[in-house]
Amino acid sequence: MGNSYAGQLKTTRFEEVLHNSIEASLRSNNLVPRPIFSQLYLEAEQQLSSLEAGSRADNEEEEEEEEEEEGSESSSPPVSYQVKPPPEGCCTTDGFCQAGKDLRLVSISNEHIEVPSGFLLVGAKSPNLPDHLLVCAVDKRFLPDDNGRNALLGFSGNCVGCGKKGFCYFTEFSNHINLKLTTQPKKQKHLKYYLVRNAQGALTKGSVICWKGAEFRGQQSSTSTCSSTLFQLPESSGLSGSTSSEPLPPANPSAPAGTQPTAAAVDHIPSTAAFSSAVYNGKESPKQQMMKNNLSALTRPSVLGTLTNSGPPKKRHKGWSPESPSSTETWNLQLNPQASNRIKNDGGSLSSLPHSALAGPASSPMVGSGEPVSVPDNLLKICKAKPVIFKGHGNFPYLCGNINDVIVSPLLYTCYRNSQSLSRAYEQYGASTIQPISEEMQLLLTVYYLVQLAADQVPLIEDLEQIFMRSWRESHLCEIRQYQPAAPQPFPQLPGPIAPVSSAQLPWLAGLAASSCNDSVHIIECSYSLAEGLSEMFKLLMEGKLTKTNYVVIICASRNRAIDSCIVITGKYQARVLSESMLSPSDYQKEVNYQLVTGKVETLGSFFSTLCPEGDIDLLLEKFYQENQGHISSSLSASANKPTAVNGAGTAVCTSYEIERHQIRPFQLAVAQKLLSHICSIADSSTQNLDLGSFEKIDFLICVPPSEVTYQQTLFHLWHSGILLELGLEKEHLTKQRVEQYVMKLDAEAQIKFKIFLQNSMQNPHTLFVLIHDHAHWDLMSAMHSLYPQTELSTGLVDRLLNCREVKEAPNIVTLHVTSFPYALQTQHTHISPYNEIHWPSSYSNGVDLYHENKKYFGLSEFIESTLSGHSIPLLRYDSSFEAMVMALGKRFPRLHSAVIRTFVLIQHYSAAMMAVCGLSQMKNYTSVETLEITQNLINSSRQCPSGHGLMVVLRIPCVPLAAVAYERLYNVRERLALEDNFEIILGNPNSGITIGKHFVEQLKIWQKIEDVDWRPQTYLELEGLPCILIFSGMDPQGESLPRSLRYCDLRLINSSSLVRTSLEQELGLAAYFVSSEIHTEKPVVNDVLESDPEKLSSTDNEDEEIATEGSTSEKRSPMKRERSCSHDSASSSLSSKASTFCTESSPPQALSNSTEETTNNYERQKQKVDKGAQTTISKHLPPVTEQLDMKQNIKSTQVSITSSSSPPFSSSSSSSAPTHNSFILQTSQCSMTKASKQPPIVFLPKLVYDIITSTDSSGLPKSSSLLPYHSVMWASSFRPLMSKMMTCTEQSLYYRQWTVPKPIHMDYNNRNEGRMDTFHPRRLLLSGPPQIGKTGAYLQFLSILSRMLIRLTEVDVYDEEEININIKEESDQYYHQPGDMWPDLETFKKMPFDYTIHDPKYEDASLICSKLQTIDSEDRSVSRRQEDMYTCRQTTRMRVSKYAAYNTYHHCEQCHQYMGFNPRYQIYESTLHAFAFSYSMLGEEIQLHFIIPKSKEHHFVFSQPGRQLESMRLPLVTDKSEDYIKSPTFTPTTGRHEHGLFNLYHAMDGASHLHVLVVKEYEMAIYKKYWPNHIMLVLPSIFNSAGVGAAHFLIKELSYHNLELERNRQEELGIKPQDIWPFIVISDDSCVMWNAVEVDCSGDRRSDYTWTERNVSLKQILQHIEATPNVTHYALIGMRKWSSKTNSAEIKEPFSCCHVHDFIMLNVDLTQNVQYNQNRFTCDDVDFNLRVHSAGLLICRFNHFSVMKKQIAVGGQRSFHIKSKVSDNPVSISPAQYICAPDSKHTFLAAPAQLLLEKYLQYHSHRFFPLSLKNYSHPVLSVDCYLNLGPQIAVCYVSSRPHSLNISSSGLTFSGLLLYLCDSFVVASFLKKFHFLKGATLCVICQDRNSLRQTVVRLELEDEWQFRLRDEFQTANAKEDRPLFFLTGRHI
């Protein structure tokens, strides 16, 4: 047989495994060695990735042949195959034929290829070109049919390249096309794909060629069909049926003859692609693989097929690497032009077919093996359900016959396979250390699981996986522990604790397990193959012997081979749910639509008619209508006129109506701040992905799903938030059209708006654009799957827009995903970093209320909690009578979809309930208690409010066609009952707006005080108070919010078969609600009742009776015992004690008893009484605080007489007072809407969903939380830990990130960088929070505070203080310069007197410097600030940073990256350390400084040639002129401000070249170098580590002078005169932020007239201006004003001043050679230096037209000096009075420099030394050669002792004190005797030690005029080693 698979297994791979197995069994002491084929096919890593099937002994021969063929691709060396050498001179290039023609598909896809009749184009795979297909033409007779059969043996083909024809042997053909095979050429192995033309005419890869059924044995996929365009996996042969809802194109060249769609493919078959991931009860199988290739175009049509393939092909093709896909996961994709718009979940459910399509090819629904099994005719008719067959282990037989009546699924097979794949978590113990759970044990555990399922439960795959996982863990616990420390052994013995189940024991044990379940599980054992078991099962079904059986387990086990098994679901309910769960959402809609359109539902309508003995409902309605036509204004509809009538009459109107406007709650603010902190952390990270400093404003775009209501709702929030005005995006007169620019519906028109957004982002690089993706879980379809013309535009839009390259790469776009269900964005391939997730905070932490909210949020957990015993009213309920009726009808109408049945039953119930409430009391038996309660409260609600406010009922009908039917029917019934003015029925369609009647629009306008004539409600929130039924349609809610008047959320019609966590939670999210909780917040207690007594728990269903919130008070609860009935479903009490939830589910739909009728009649009578105003008494058994009484209690509780809910309830004021007797009186009406807003809505669920939601695992986690999180993701492994209730949101996120992977249809599928971790997008954030909790408000608030922060980032606090001591200024009318002069005139300037007074406001608390000309008012100055206030309380103003500002290290921008040395494109800047020494006589030693010079700055320095020793710093010439160069080197001394110092002068210098040196202390060198790697550092010697700023200034000046000398010498050799070298340096504070220039306009008529403006300019402009001053080298010091907003014209009228300069000075180091800074000083050293310079006769010039702004920096600088005790580390504050002490005393010594203690003491306590000087400004203290701050209340007079110095004339001055500070030899006795002192004036002499103190007294002959006492000697509080300073005080004699 030339093409058969018979043969011998010869590969070395097999021999190797066989050898290993024998060796292992010899070594092992266990009798059961590991099977050989398990090793071949079930190795852990292969199982984990490719799910390969285990081989079976019964088809060993075929497998041997396969193994032989696969030898070349196995891990061992291949068997060599001799290829004939090619003919001489022919082409041997891969991809070309021997004639040299290109055969690669990519090259010739667009060429016209002649294909002879009867031939098909196919793609061949060459082992040397794995990424290419070679095009061949092959006679289709030699190719297989759809079943892999009927291919003629042999080969006939042509070469499409050179046109050579007639190749009769594939060997010959393979040589011609240069396949270069190393194994025997076989067509089955190398001809892989059919090739077809796509819509553009290009040749593309089509479906896989289905060679022989054997390749499909192990890969049964989900029951499904393929669309007319089939997407197939690469290299995984998978036969796929295809159906089409339109005739297939006849031009398809690859359509084989005779293959037409079968009869089953009628016009309603959905065209979805097969094989979806299998779903068991609506859940994907946990381990599905991904699809690599792009999806193909039209392939050949085949018969309708349910092909269930169970895994990868047995032949290991190259595609089956551990990462490769399995054919179980070809995804559902719609490619039909008429396809539905709901593609997004197509990959999510088991199969995407209606029932008639869930069949398969007529010959075989599942390609199997062995003898075929015939499916009997009329199976569906007899069984009333289609059996669902789940393939288990082993081989599955062929099915033939009536295969439309069965469904075959591989889901269980996949589960079994996954559960045998050991998780990577256990690989550390060795691949074979711990054995997976055996097949026998798997099957036995499955039987155990099925046995314990209740009759109304459906098996869940998650449950089974957890059972397998637990079983495996328990059986291997000791092995796991044993192997944790030790290295794994290659073949350990099998686990011992649990005896393995043998295949012989299995049927017996399974039968034993099933014996206890009353035949709900039936075991069939067969000896030969599954075929006989299936045949027997069909026979039993046909004979009706399995009516009580829900599950049939068929086992074929024998000793000599592995087991075969399958499980058949025969239970009608279970089979229906499981088969319907296989429909994708789009096909679910199509199937329902088909049944509606074809009239199949009419049988249901006629059946309903027969139920009603009084006749057809429509006839009854018509009769009622005719009878009541004249009485339309009956009491029920009278409420319609109430609002207008009441308002007109001026009587009581309901005042409770209010629509909540935009207000920010504490929670929202907290979340907004968390978002902001995440944005800041992205900006602060070293990755520089976000440069916040470069943005000036915010812009944004909010993307919402294509729901008109959601869109309008977002516009509403945006409008009322005021955010557009706040961000400055819009002006005051905001129009709706302008607001719409910022919200984008993700529909067909979205691309236009998004394009504008992208263009704006590119055009505005300094605007930060925030792209907000709201409801972000909505459409996660990959754009790749929606690029085909057949798909609707809106799908894949999120991927196409938000994931486009422009968004990803734009540095100014931040994407924020906002969702309540983030799970689908938390996969292994997510774009969002876990660090960029923000979760809504919990309100309580350790019992503490973190955010004081006045409302309590009710979400899923609170709803579930309400069902637990001990809570007043269960908010979640199910309707047992409704469920019973649906189940009964489901059996009666097996061909109708259950959604159709459920909808029709519910519409019937609502119709009957309306009729019953309107007086047709006989109809109450044809509705359920729940529906009657809802309808009654709805209809009566508007009557209880004087203004007609009512309740909203949401009726959720996901299927749009069914919603339309329901709307039409209910509308009709309402009209017939004359209720059209009583309540509205609204059809909520996601694609359209809200339509309501004119009457109700008028009502809403009155309530909301709207005068606009054309106003219409556009959001559901605007329906507040409107009594209505909102029929909410659409497959998924899309973020619509509901008003507070919502009372009932009827979810009985949600698609309960699609059990996915997101789907369930978003349905329940509709009911999420904020409840007012103004009173208390403690949890309510069930009063006086023990929880353990179930009979005493509250049983009433009066949801209005108690406020079921945690915030309600205990007084609102009844202290009395309440009656309850026994059942726990909603028809009785709704208390869901789990134990009894199943006791009534089988009750018939007509279960209402006679007592029901009696009590209801009683209710009718009571109602009439109440309507007449009678007072009704209620039995004592009811709580006294009943706010509203329901219908349900009337029906169920026969012990009490009850008023209906139409009776007026109590006013709220009475609710807090307990009555004094047992009867009470019904009082005035209260608005139902008000009550509704005080309690969460009541939710009705399908029973199946209710059970899942309310059942919890051992940790208390609801079962719904452990479901698959989303349709388009899948579990990475069955071996995953269980989720826990204790998991935080962050832990849940990490769990999903580890254990879920996206399917190929998910937009994150391709987000993988092999081996790299940078798949996260740096500017993408995820905000998640419960539904309806206020996320929109939070992100709008985030935009607001982000905008404020950006403005704040572009602003800076600068000191803004008026100059001080202005009134002391010399008053003179003489002005030396004109206001418009640009530079001072040297000769004129020399005539200007020096202004001794300090005007800088930072010296407000410094001593005044007196000159003879000043007269000072003694009241002028006082102590104005405390020490610490000096920095914190100075006046500042906030200024916008200009483009010429200096920046700290937090500033990043493109322009200055290189300047800063942080640009990643540049290498880290290398620096070199250079020593620089010079001698200075005053210090008595050589000074050694160190320069750190980056490589990029070395050009500023001169180095010696051989040794690269630093010689000098280059200086320019005085005559140099350059626009781009600053001549003066800038020195900035700094300490403690490595982050905050403003050292980035790039922008301030406007990019000009400049030399900037940071002067730092030695211990701070490393940290400054880290933050400023590209700056030159001058490192002070270590002896100056504790010195003040004086030392830095001193060394800067001395170094600069020394450098000037070196440069003069160096350049003198070049012929340059010494005086031509530039002598200036700039000394700048580290807080100078901006510079301003005053522009004076002197164009007035008179010289004195001028105007001036101040603007920000660059430092470059100012320095170049000053450097250009004429005769500039004659000035010793040049400075500028300190900026103040209060500067007046007088201050700048004189453009230049001769006065003190501070903060930013230009210093002439040449002229000031002999004037030094005092290196010991900490404060006021600049004032001291200014006075020295002036007294030396040098010129100090201040440019008044320039000013410097100083930033307030709260750290570093002078604040870095902390004075503390030397002995203890206790940071006790020490007052300045303790800074000095008596010598030799036991005073606590302080750890601070002596000079600092001296200066601080004198600043605060100098009045102790100079008592006469206090506030005595006319008699100052004489200070010789120095200025020390003696505090603001003492004035000083500075004199210099130097010869020829300029001093004030002291002839008329009498001094109140004398201060001699470290006086040198220039101070002599004769100098001091010139000055006159008051009697009692005091003297203070300060010296370095006591010895020099005495010498000074003697040398200066002080004892002649001053009296000294021994006790007047002091010292600073320093230890001896710290060299204290000593004081001596005396009095003038």
Image (cartoon, rainbow, N blue to C red):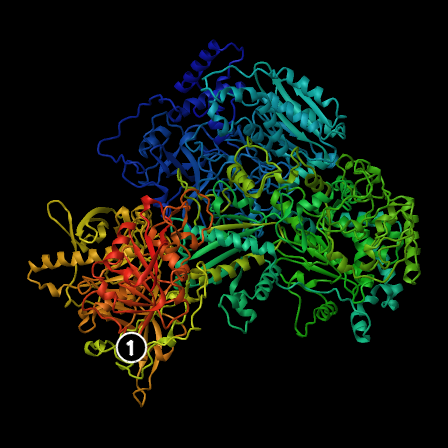
**In this rendering, is residue 370 above or below 622?**
above
Q: Which residue is label 1 attached to?
A: 1695
> Which residue is nearer to you in this view: 1656 or 483?
1656
> Which residue is nearer to you in this view: 853 or 1676?
1676
1504 sits left or right of 1075 in the view: left
- Report the residue that reaches farthest toward the bottom: 1645
**In this rendering, is residue 141 above or below 1381?**
above
Image quarter where the N terminus lies is top left
Pointer 1 local density, CA inside 10 Å: few below 14, some 14–19, many at least 20:
many
- The image quadrant that residue 1887 belongs to is bottom left
SS for callout 1: loop
Q: At 81% from the left edge and 61% from the top edge, which residue is drawn?
A: 1230
> Which residue is nearer to you in this view: 756 or 1675?
1675
**In this rendering, is residue 113 above or below 756?**
above
> Which residue is nearer to you in this view: 289 or 1477?
1477
Position in image of residue 627 (x %, y %): 89, 63
Position in image of residue 843 (x %, y %): 63, 49
